[in-house]
Image (cartoon, rainbow, N blue to C red):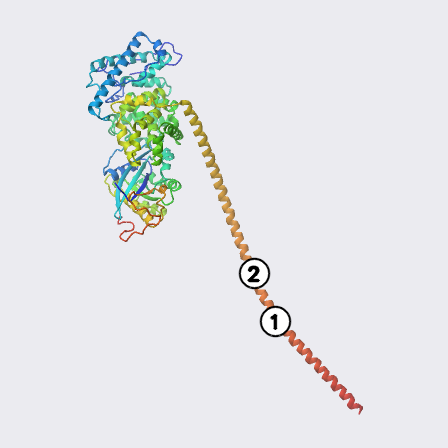
Amino acid sequence: MAYAYLFKYIIIGDTGVGKSCLLLQFTDKRFQPVHDLTIGVEFGARMITIDGKQIKLQIWDTAGQESFRSITRSYYRGAAGALLVYDITRRDTFNHLTTWLEDARQHSNSNMVIMLIGNKSDLESRREVKKEEGEAFAREHGLIFMETSAKTASNVEEAFINTAKEIYEKIQEGVFDINNEANGIKIGPQHPTTNSTLPSSQGGQHAGGGCC
Amino acid sequence: MSIPSSSPERESSAGVQLECPSSPPGMDADPPSTGSPVLSPDSSSHDAVLSAPAASPADSENLSPDELELLAKLEEQNRLLEADSKSMRSMSGSRRNSGSSLVSSSSASSNLSHFEEDTWILWGRIVNEWEEWRRKKDKLLKELIRKGIPHHFRAIVWQLLGNATDMPVKNQYSELLKMSSPCEKLIRRDIARTYPEHEFFKGQDSLGQEVLFNVMKAYSLVDREVGYCQGSAFIVGLLLMQMPEEEAFCVFVRLMQEYRLRELFKPSMAELGLCIYQFEYLLQEQLPELNIHFRSQSFHTSMYASSWFLTLFLTFLPLPVATRIFDIFMYEGLEIIFRVGLAILQYNQTDLIQLDMEGMSQHFQKVIPHQFDSCPDKLILRAYQVKYNPKRMKKLEKEYTTIKNKEMEEQIEIKRLRTENRLLKQRIETLEKESAALADRLIQGQVTRAQEAEENYVIKRELAVVRQQCNAASENLEKAQDTIRELQQQRVNNCRY
């Protein structure tokens, strides 16, 4: 299917925070309570619409254990967006965010959009990390933030789509060099070939989208 | 099935008498004491005999008439099965739809049960005369393993192949279970995600999950450097489908120590990098077009091959097929993983070349895993057609180590340069500050000088004015004196008169 743009994403975060479940919920709209352990990397894709344009998301889901970093690091380069996931019921997964962020910043292109995700929001009774803490961390480090539940599908669409919106805006602003595929963005086959200066969007395109 | 205490050490000449199943199929021997389930459908005993090269003449000479006869039978079965699978394929018209059992519809089924019986007798003998087989008929043993170890012999044969029948560490096992491991939480989290669809491991309190946890925990305690690494539980899980936990633990310890697995699962996973490097070389050498296509699509080897090496195809292929590969792995080591991997790529080359990155990922996830469900022998046969040169692989290892060392040196150099850079930057900063201060003083000086010059100018002008006034005054004075002199002269003159 033709698309205007293709964005590459990477999903990172500690083991067991629900990375694969988020991906499955987004691509297949289903939840698998016991998901197979991810060894190395897994792949998923879906089409979304932003500003009336078809955008294809190609998503790399990575293994969370520390040992796998040497493999997963090579996927940062060439990603336009990253979903950094922690588990709101496990404080340690929140504490490790700084290391994840350092790793991501060091190995990705500087414009990569990072969305911080506090997953398992359905497990309110077991919550260990307050929503405000996630918000504060995101504010401090310039990330977008959202709490999701891969189980109930709450905010899952929004997490992936809002990240895409942010990338799309950056393209409009001319921040991303879309002709360099190493930035994780590809122009679709039917898109008129333009220089890196894009025609500015003709109104209508709402900044940020109306979510949370 | 129990292992006798007498060890099959190399020097033991008597050969080991092992208690092993000798009943024909259908009257199965007792499962291992943990009650491991039977792999089903297990293909090994059925289609164990697609064509594989016959034992070399040198081997045949060492064989007894019985064994020669059996070998001939194996070949005959081979032929029958091949013919049968061919007709099946032409009937169904699809290679992926050739049914689950070749046997049921086979005209050779009556022969097969005889054949199975023979296979059991043969494997019974192999296990009983293990040392002798290893010494004298190793090549034939290798061929037989490639054709698949019958399910009920796997536990003992894997232990024998791994030389894990008499390990001191086995005695520590129960003690280890009483200890606590720093990896426990992590292991616990992964247990349910290991073979979640498999009967034995299903359910939170299943026996499978419990013994899997035990073995992983015990291992994490004997090898603190590795501890627990994701992926390894699939290998242990497979062992547990065949044997009790103590035995599985021993085999796993051996696999980690002697089969490069420990290197694979070490925290840096450096060995995985090497395997990928070696695999890429084979790919480039033997499937150059596909390699170019992968590169043009940015389809990295690690995307599909990481799990092949880390879980020995156990998370990629259905268990009956992966178990056949594991049989061979137990005998020949990681080489079979390279061979099977390349065979899979070669088999799919024409399809893959027409697909983009996404298409290829889908093909790897959905199509390839089930291509060999009904014919693992075909995959194994293809694997042995792959060119694999151990010397070349060793050379590649050296190359890789050199590259990595160089990279590491460069990293160290970069780090050193970064520090130096940082220090120089600091120095520049202080110098810049100093320079700014000096410039400031310079300007201040210049300003003062300008002010002084102006003052000087004013003073000079004042001086000129004063001088002028002075000159004028002297002139006046002179005039006055002249006048005085004149007046005095007049007075003198007046007095004279």
Quadrant of the drawing holding the C terminus of chain B: bottom right
Query: In the picture, residue B251 is in which quadrant?
Result: top left
Q: Which amino acid does label 2 sit on?
A: Gln
Q: Position of residue A157 (x, y in %)?
A: 25, 43
Name the residue type under label 1.
Arg
Corner quadrant of residue A3:
top left
Mark 2–mark 1 Cα distance, whole angstroms, equals 22 Å
Give the number of callouts.
2
Residue B95 as seen in the image, left or right of residue B433 = left
Per the image, the residue denoted by label 2 is B446
User: What chain is tagged by disc 1?
Assistant: B
Looking at this view, is B62 or B80 the one in front?
A: B80
Q: SS for tag 2?
A: helix
Q: Is residue B473 above or below residue B91?
A: below
Q: In which image quadrant can residue B350 be found?
A: top left
Task: Give percent across and percent down for residue A75.
Answer: 35, 37
> Which of the image's four quarters has the N terminus of chain B?
top left
Contact (Cβ within 8 Å) of mark 2 with mark 1: no
Q: Which of B280 and B252 is in front in this view?
A: B280
Above or below, comparing residue A114 to residue B462 in the picture: above
Tell which of A140 and A19 is nearer to you.
Answer: A19
The disc, 2 or 1, on the residue closer to the chain's N-terminal end is 2
Same-chain status of marks 2 and 1: yes
The reply to whether residue A36 is visible in this rendering is: no
Residue B157, percent across and down? 32, 17
Is residue B384 positioned above or below A98 on the image?
above
Instruction: Please tell me which residue lies in front, B217 or A30.
Output: A30
Residue labelled with disc 1: B461
Q: Badge 1, how many Cα within 10 Å: few under 14, some, many 20+?
A: few
Q: Could you say where residue B196 lies in the image, as x and y percent from the top left?
A: 26, 29
